[in-house]
Image (cartoon, rainbow, N blue to C red):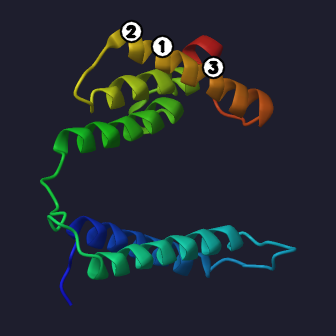
Amino acid sequence: MKIKSQKDFFSGLLYTLVGAAFAYGATSYNIGTGARMGPGYFPLLLGSILAVIGAIILFKSLVVETPTGDQVGSWAWKPLFFVIAGNLLFGILLGGLPSIKFPAMGLIVAIYGTTLIVSMAGDTFKIKEVLILATILSVMSYLAFILLLKLQFPVWPTFISG
């Protein structure tokens, strides 16, 4: 069979493999029933749905003809680097690195740092817009996670809050 859309083929393949892996991984947990869901119920359901969506996209890539063949372009290295770096930075700033005695900086600093780094992935970088976005994200995250959900993790750097 000929691949008629490379973009759809590879994205469908990725969805199918990731979904199947999550569904398979969820089987090691207690699944439970619809009325009494176990810890594996949601990952199994979500992984299965993701795998089915991937299979549909994969099938479409083999059946539906596209005018240009939707070739896969080159890797976008800059956005890939900055998005991954932003996620790593968030984890480091939120929890710190005890092995090198780097203290936890808390949620607010982690959001500002991550927003600044990830915003460099785009074509334009406007510091004013980035700081406004970081402020809105920080306030909303504080309201959602600290006040409403009452999650216990540092909000401010440990050298400030103690």
Label 1 Cα crowd, 10 Å radius (few <14 / some 14-19 / many 20+): few
Q: Could you tell me residue 97's position as x and y percent?
A: 44, 35
Lower sequence index among marks 1 and 3: 1
Instruction: Name which quarter of the figure residue 9 lies in.
Output: bottom left
Residue 128 has which mark?
2
Front-most of residues 123 and 39? 123
* Residue 157 seen in the current view: no
Front-most of residues 2 and 128? 2
Task: Using the numbered discs, state the Cα–Cα distance from disc 1 to disc 3 in whole angstroms.
Answer: 11 Å
Which three-letter amino acid code belongs to the residue tagged 2? Lys
Which three-letter amino acid code belongs to the residue tagged 1? Ile
Task: Using the numbered discs, state the Cα–Cα distance from disc 2 to disc 1 in whole angstroms.
Answer: 6 Å
Disc 3 marks which residue?
A: 139
Outermost residue, bottom side: 1
Seen in the image, is 97 located left or right of residue 30? left
Helix, strand or loop at mark 2: helix
Seen in the image, is 42 located left or right of residue 98? right
Front-most of residues 98 and 127? 127
Q: Is residue 150 above or below residue 142?
A: below
Q: Are marks 2 and 1 in contact (CB under 8 Å)?
A: yes
Q: Could you tell me residue 83's position as x and y percent?
A: 33, 40
Front-most of residues 99 and 149? 149
Q: Could you tell me residue 20's position as x and y percent?
A: 48, 78
